[in-house]
Amino acid sequence: MAACPFRRSIASQLSRVLNLPPENLINSISAVPVSKKRPVADFQLFVDSVIEDKSSDRSKPDLQLQTQRLAEKLKCDTVVSEISTGPGTVNFTINRELLAKTVLQQVFKDGSKYGIKSELFSTLPRRKIVIEFSSPNIAKKFHVGHLRSTIIGNFVANLREALGHQVTRINYLGDWGMQFGLLGAGFQQFGNEEELQSNPLQHLFEVYVQVNKAAEEDENIKKLAQDFFRKLEARDQQTLSMWQHFRDFSIEEYVRIYKRLGVHFDEYSGESFYQEKSQEVLKMLDTKGLLQKTIKGTRVVDLSEKRDLSLSSTVMRSDGTSLYITRDLAAAIDRMQKYNCDTMIYVTDKSQNTHFEQLFQILKLMDYQWAERCQHVSFGLVQGMKTRKGEVVFLEDVLNEARSRMLQNMASAKTSKELENPLETAEKIGLAALIIQDFKGLLSSDYQFSWDRVLQSRGDTGVFLQYTHARLHSLEQMYRNGQSTDINTACLQDPQAISVLQHLLRYDEVLYKSSEDLQPKHIVSYLLTLSHLAAVAHKTLPVKGSAPELAQARLRLFQAARSVLANGMKLLGITPVTQM
């Protein structure tokens, strides 16, 4: 990675002065964020992080003195052209021509692996990772909450995969439980086979709403629903084939929606797979003396510290049927046996935090050491997402709305070219807009949704990223024939060019940050800044009408910016457009 030879070179000089191995210093040397106000150095070392004496009573003047002393011992060389100090930092400026040459070379040599081949990741062990995400409930609406789980899970999987881990993507469908009793009983009364085939999710949802309403008024329907589910658990053939019918149609429709989102799964699993295995889990819990019977006849696992049942988790109903958590326990154990993975990640909204705490706790009580390596990535809720027709019921409504609003914006924009496939382009831009809006903040935060804000073409939006990418792409196409790879980097010394190069230098650190905390916001903010810097450079450093040598160098710089922009967008789950 571009930054590597620089970091390594600075680290080796520091290691001689500080008497520490260079490996220990690499992570303490960080690229300096670009400033709009003034030129900045390229790298900085936080002196605090490498000084042996960590006594907390060290005063600021004392630290500054040590910083000064350290800086005085360091010398400029062929790589570093200037050394200065800031508050608690030693700053390094790289030889300007070397900076341009190395960064551009590295971007084109590493291609889609740029930033990932960085030595920040060199000691990273390759792992087997299972990620469970999206996981809608069959027959209930695939709502906006599932959109978040789908795009966040997809991002986590993309990032882990890019870093060389072996990732298995699992969609764990809500395809079992009492809701199916209701649905089965409801379909027998209100269902219609033709409608089921032409629009399964819509029809099953309508039936579900109808039967829920009817069950409130009629105890008999509740009884029918319980009978249907009991038959299902007893594997009655006729009941099972009806259930299978619902499931198959629903999955077919999901696959089509996922395709629009650019998301795929390696396995469609579901609670139904673990109905029998959950009985085995109950036996195991019993054998280990972890099952306790309550007055109501349910079975619970005591999770309290004093073992006084002040905190417990119900794992079996009084009629012997399994619960959601029992099936989750069975699924976790089964997956661990099947995939022998190092980490298991669950992506759901934060209302399930307690559920996963209890799940992992029970697994630990069952002596599964790997429970330590299970992780819940939780996210907040989206408020106020409506379409022109009113409340959002299905994810498709959101995708269609984003596409149609985008088409409208494109049609009214003066700059829009005649596109070969306006619908497809509008879909990709609309999706980028939804993803960037979703990924800008901390995942755990709730946020207020607004179409106007999401689809603005200026400002920090997905539309702006797509616009920048398309613009840089058309610039490349214009000069496709006269491109040379051998450029004179002395032509890239303008402050605007240096800012872009410095920003490209930081990409590996941003990836590293996101890989540590699984938050996409670091990458989002990096790409938005890259787009702003590229826009400024595009204005002030024209390719057209410049001397050939200058034009070539600038073109190469814009190409590098576009390449890294595209890499980052793809990690987030966005398909970059080439015209709009």
Image (cartoon, rainbow, N blue to C red):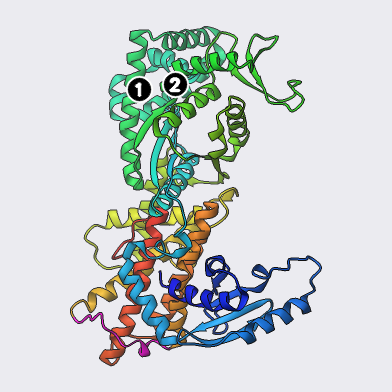
In the depicted view, which residue is nearer to us: 25 or 509?
Answer: 25
Q: Which residue is mark 2?
A: 274
At x 60%, y 79%, the residue is 17
Q: Are marks 1 and 2 in contact (CB under 8 Å)?
A: no
On the image, the x and y values in percent for residue 532 come to 46, 73
Range of residues picked out in magenta: 482-493
On the image, the x and y values in percent for residue 513 come to 53, 59
In the depicted view, which residue is nearer to us: 313 or 1?
Answer: 1
On the image, the x and y values in percent for residue 109 come to 31, 70
Q: Which residue is mark 1?
A: 246
In the depicted view, which residue is nearer to us: 384 or 445?
Answer: 445
Specify whether residue 223 is in view. yes
On the image, the x and y values in percent for residue 256 come to 31, 39
- Classify 551 as above or below 109: below
- Classify 215 as above or below 486: above
At x 60%, y 30%, the residue is 364
Query: Dot 2 lies on which element?
Result: helix
The answer to if 219 sits in the magenta stretch is no
Q: Answer with the quarter of the image where residue 489 lies.
A: bottom left
